[in-house]
Amino acid sequence: MVDRYDVVIAGAGPAGAQCARDLATRDYDVVVLETEQEDEFPRQSNKSTAGTFPSMMSSFGVPDDVVMSYTDDVVLESPNSHYKSYQPGAVLEFAEFKRFLVADGRENGAEYRFDSRVSRPILDDDGVIEGVRYNGDEEVYGEVVVDATGPAAPIASALDVVDLERENQAIGIEYEMEGVEMNHPEYADLRRAMMLRLDHDIAPGGYSWIFATGEDTAKVGLCYIQNDRHREFAQEGQTVDGYLDAWVDRDPRFADAETIDEKVHRGSAHIQMPDEMHTDRFLAIGDTVPSIDPLWGEGIHKGMKSARAAAATVDRCLTDSERRLDAESLAVYERLWHRDVAPRMKSRLMLTRLLYLAPNERYDQFMRDLRQAEENTLEKANQGEKASMAKLLHLSDVPLLAKFAREHLGS
Ligand SMILES: Cc1cc2nc3c(=O)[nH]c(=O)nc-3n(C[C@H](O)[C@H](O)[C@H](O)COP(=O)(O)OP(=O)(O)OC[C@H]3O[C@@H](n4cnc5c(N)ncnc54)[C@H](O)[C@@H]3O)c2cc1C
């Protein structure tokens, strides 16, 4: 008998598991194939700092049990300065959060197959996907297939829907630490904060972070995109682990701190403009698109929003009397993605590139400007509003902008 579902989802990350939740709630037959084994899930995929905001928690019914700590502020730090803004948030226990999404989906009828590594699409005579192959020669068929495997993207790549480029790959590593001095006299009070630091000496062409998880415990990490910007500021031969160790060694806030046993998380995501994200009977969601916010790496909420847009699209197509699932009918997903998931992605990518191009001294100036600017300037610039971005630029940035134009506009 053919193993067949309405929807086959590859990957039980925030995006895949949320898509399954939404579809199961609407009574579709959905199966999720996850490469990791259930008894240790998530292991390798337990990669995220999982800082998020109340809007995500309420939109997706995420319970307080998976929250490690609530935070009041977001702090931006530069080598010699900082800027603090009141923005309540939550740091999740990412593994528990992932397990919650799976359990909740199952309660609503979603089926999960762990230890199931998806390798490639099964195509019909017209070259349209009708299922996936996993664990060698196992097969499962669906009306629609969703690739939610994050940067692995085996189906989306095979169908030529996405092309995740190494040049745009950001890599990150993080330690969970205890004994961190969260209110050090030389720095901002981080006891209830998520802090992001722009400093090429610590994370060349990227940023580092301290997210409070308790009075003296925190998630401490860094990431950067492995591109020219990184190479310009990088030290020869240094690895991402080496950069984090070097920061932990020299920042006084970690003088008495230790890494909590085995609490090391690492992973990657691509920071690039999505091209296509669907074709006949197929949708890519989450980091496979990629949906992650380029500027600050907020990928959980974005991925879950993309999952919801995909589920709504499938629902709409399957409730229509014609049940058409060709690329044209599924195109509504891309429209929803650009409208609701990541509006102004292009401007935000531009801002990201500009930000990482700036030297350390400019970061100090940036903090001073933010303190003087109207309260919502950062928020608006963050949303990709050009007028607010312009407010944060100076005449002295002209060489920077010229360099940016040379590199990105080819002039
Ligand atoms: C170090 C780091 C820190 C981060 N911090 C934050 C943060 O603070 N806040 C935030 O919002 N975001 C953060 N992110 C980003 C966020 O974690 C991702 O954007 C999010 O996890 C993407 O979800 P996803 O479901 O698309 O993909 P993933 O989380 O990558 O999930 C993919 C799933 O697919 C499975 N899989 C992979 N290949 C296969 C296959 N062939 N077959 C079957 N299953 C497969 C994986 O095991 C995994 O379970 C961080 C990322 C990293 C790396």
Image: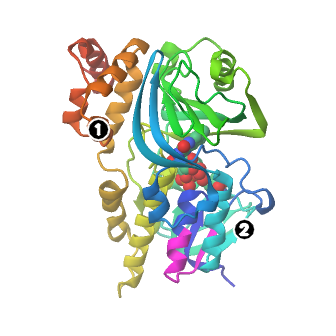
171 relative to 175 in the view: left or right: left
Residue segment shown in magenta = 20-32
In the drawing, what numbered circle is on residue 138?
2
297 vs 85, left or right, is right
Q: Quadrant of the C terminus?
A: top left
Would you say 42 lies left or right of 4 here? right
Q: Which residue is drawn at 50% across and 40% down?
A: 270
Q: What residue type is labelled 2?
A: Glu
Q: Dividing the image into 4 quarters, which one contains the N terminus?
A: bottom right
Up the image or down, 272 lies above or below 160; here it is: above
Task: Identify the residue at horizontal 66%, vertical 79% (top origin).
Answer: 3
Residue located beneath label 1 in the image:
347
Residue 24 is inside the magenta segment: yes
* Residue 241, above or below 33: above
Q: Foreground: 176 or 172?
A: 176
Q: Name the kind of residue labelled 1 in the image.
A: Ser
Of circles 1 and 2, the one toward us is 1
Could you say where residue 274 lies in the image, as x and y percent from the top left?
Answer: 39, 46
Query: Is residue 93 one of those drawn in magenta?
Result: no
401 w.r.t. 269: above or below: above
- Tell me where residue 333 sits by quadrant: bottom left
